[in-house]
Image (cartoon, rainbow, N blue to C red):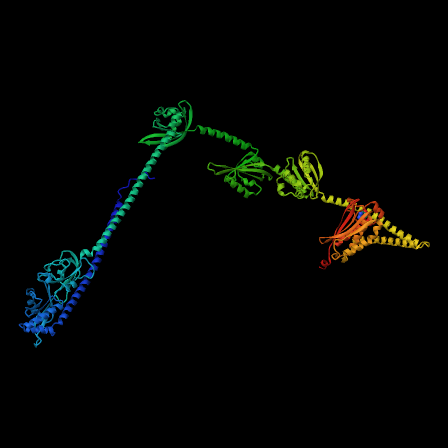
Amino acid sequence: MNSHRQKPFIPWLLIALFMAISVCSIILGYLYYMNQKKELLSDMQTELSAITDLKVSQIIQWKNERIANALMLGDFSPFAEGVADYLKNREDNNLRAATANNLKMLARRNDCRAALIIDTVGNILLSEPNQDRKEYFYMKELMPGLMSMGRTVLTEIYGTDKTSKVHLNLMIPVRDTKDKDKTIIGFLALKIDPRLTFFPLVQTWPVPSRTAESMLIREDNDQIIYLNETRYWKNQQELLRRPAGAEKLPSAMALQGIEATTEGIDYRGNNVVAAMKKVPDSNWYLVSKIDHKEVFSVLDRQMTMIIIIITLFILATGLILGIIEWNENVRFYREKYEAELDRLALRKHFDYILKYANDIIFLTDNDSVIIEVNDTAVEMYKYSREELIGMSLTTLLAPGSLNKMSEEKKIIDSRGQATFEIFHRRKDGTFVPLEVSSRKVEIEGISYYQSICRDITERMLAEATLRQSEERLRKIFEESPLSIVITGKDMEIFKVNPAFCRMTGYLERELKEMSFSSFILDDHSAEDKESLKQLIDGEILVFHTEKRYLCKDKSVIWGSTTMSVIHDNIDDVNYFIAMIEDITMRKQAEAELDNSFSLIKATFESTADGILVVSKEGRIVQYNHKFMEMWKIPPEVMESEEDEKVVEFVMNQLVAPEEFVSLVKQHYSSHEEVTSELLLFRDGRVFERYSQPQKIAGKSVGRVWSFRDITEMKKTEADLIAAKEKAEESDRLKTAFLHNVSHEIRTPMNAIIGFSALLNEPNITDDERRQFIDIIFNSGSQLLSIINDIVDIANIESGQVKLNMGEMNLNTTLRKLGEQFRYKEQDAGLSIKLITGLSDEESIIVTDSTKLVQVLSNLISNAIKFTKEGHVEFGYQYKNEFIEFFVKDTGIGIPQEYHDRIFDRFFQVDNVVSRKFGGTGLGLSISKAYVEILGGKIWLHSRPGEGTVFYFTIPCKTKTSAAV
Ligand code: ADP
């Protein structure tokens, strides 16, 4: 802001610029006009000169044509001869009449106004139509000339009083043909009216123009006669005349022989541009002219436009310059206005400061009399404003401050200003400490003292508080059991406390020459630098590290170090504070603890048992991987560290989950108990669980659980028991078998031996012998059957049984089998019935028929053996590509508990019938083995006392399917 800006002067520069632009524009316009004018004039002069030349040549051509036409009438033409005859015999009336007649024709034919015959002295002898002789006054003068030329000529144009009677004659000499010299005896004159063909030729202008015209002139007695009618001299009584010496008149110039195109003043007195030329072989001059006004009319129109444009340009320039000037003025006044506003604001601000300033402001004169004070002073001293003004400043000084005041006044007088502290006294007698800034000022040539005083009571109090606080801090620093080091930004030690000296063994003065980093053993410089940077940037308030420090005696101690920064007033880092706690003992204890912990951990992991340690609060304290593996617990469950979650996760794996949960709870509640139990899993596993309390200083803090997987052990145990039982059973069966076999063999053997001996008796009858032989035969068969059974079972067990597949008719075979047992019907009082499931044709199958028959025989003989009365049915039916055989009896039946075992080798139900009928206990086991070898299975339905049905199946291989 420029508050001293002056109002601008009259803008001479702009005005000069405007004038210069205007003058230049006008000069340029004028030059352009002059140039255009010159060009236009030059163009017009060329045009006029060309037109004049054209007209002159047309006139010559017209004249020549007229003379050529006249030649045909002259000399030896019949017409001329007729005229010559008349001239020679003028009195001959016939001739006169004939010639007059000829003249009439001639005048009509040649577009002449009249045809005349003139004698050699100029008298008109004949004229057709009849002419006023006086009008031809010039003939007499002409004659001598005509006579001497002796050829056809065109006369001058002679004007009369009336322009309509302008004379232009074609003079044709008439000669006496009979005369030797051919003397001219008269003239035939054809009066031509120039207005018909000649003047239009002169007057027509080749281009459209409002003022241009051509004029034919000639001189006559110092006068210029305008032969043709002009644009502005029409239908007049007389021909136009002007003096030959008229100035600037183009026609006059023509007579003077000037032929150049020039500017002049025409017969009307108007400015014109004209071109002049003499018509050769005549006294005529052709003058062509055009009005100056017309020539320059285009230029005048252009000039109007140019003047308008220049005027507009000048106006526009003036306007722009005016706007620039106006803008300048606006800016000037705006700045002036803003400066005024600022000044007012400053003034207001100053008044405000004076009124409301927190500081006391005085103005005193040279005698220390108060001239002006502000409101704060009134408030501070409790005097009214009126009381203060005029009061001596010394009244306000506290006792003892007068000397100081006069000293300071001297300083102000010499240096112009001073700042000092002094005590003042209020009206109520209380004292106030002030900080005074006093300055000498000149107001209208008189020196005054302006003092600004600040109440520094609070500051003094604060300083005292600060001193106390500093003292306290110093005490803390000095007496702290923690080592404290204050370093500069470069880590150079600045201050240490006694604890640090004790810890390191150095003296304070030694330390002050060292760097804090020189104690540090571990190289964590990169991490430390990063942390220090964060500390400096204010991202962290402190950072903590544990480092090893090297003491003066080369011993190493561990220190827990906390670093922080002290900022100065503008947030720059001034100092670092390090507080170090000696943790050497703790570190040693930790190392030992780590060692034992790793030992425990290794032991924990290397045991084959799963181990879990749970705190009293139910938090998982420790576990090994074996534990997770055994219980199939995912890591996330373990990571929850809650035993409750683990129990929840595993409980469903157990056969009795509720019991498990309640036992766990019970063990937790009895803190001292040592427990052991078995856990049965649904998947068959068995765990042995031990638990005992974990104690610290004899107090239970949790419980240690250990689990051992004893599934394999239990299984081996069970297998051993089963094997033992099986061996015992087999031993028993074998004993029974041996017992049976010996019984079964001994019985028929005894019969064979006994009855064979009886056969040798001499006194036996034939019937008796036959009976004995039967008995011996049956016993032999029984013996063979037993031996066969034993051999079969031995083959089966050694896996040597081979199938002998062949085609058989089932119905036929079963019928034969039924027949074999028929004899038993009477013996046992039973009926035996066969039921076939297929027709005879359908019943051809492929199987090992021997084995099938053996199975059926075994079953049928057992049925008959164990049925006292009733009936035995056997047969088969076709079921789903299998043939299901059955053997049904109404015998003693077999109790349910033996159903599984009767197919075992040597097994027999222990009952009266078995004991009575004997048997080896092999029949059913052989049958079962054969059925299974044939691809089927065997089972039974039986109830004691109701009878038994044995079923077995074999695959139904018919003839066709077997072939396939
Ligand atoms: P055994 O030579 O003793 O008959 P088996 O193996 O044929 O040997 O039979 C075993 C046992 O099954 C028999 O001792 C008998 O107790 C019982 N048993 C077999 N078939 C029948 C049946 N139809 N009715 C009752 N008990 C039977």
Q: Position of residue 293 (x, y in %)?
A: 18, 55
Q: Nearer the viewer, residue 739 or 552?
A: 739
Q: Position of residue 524 (x, y in %)?
A: 56, 43
How many dots with numbers?
A: 0
Q: Name above or below for residue 279 compared with residue 709.
A: below
Question: Is residue 328 visible to us here?
Answer: yes
Which quarter of the picture shows residue 614?
top right
372 with respect to 235 (left or right): right
286 with respect to 918 (left or right): left
941 with respect to 599 (left or right): right
Q: Name above or below for residue 405 compared with residue 107.
A: above
Q: Quadrant of the C terminus?
A: bottom right
Question: Is residue 907 visible to us here?
Answer: no
Q: Quadrant of the N terminus?
A: top left
693 with respect to 549 (left or right): right
Q: Nearer the viewer, residue 222 or 230?
A: 230
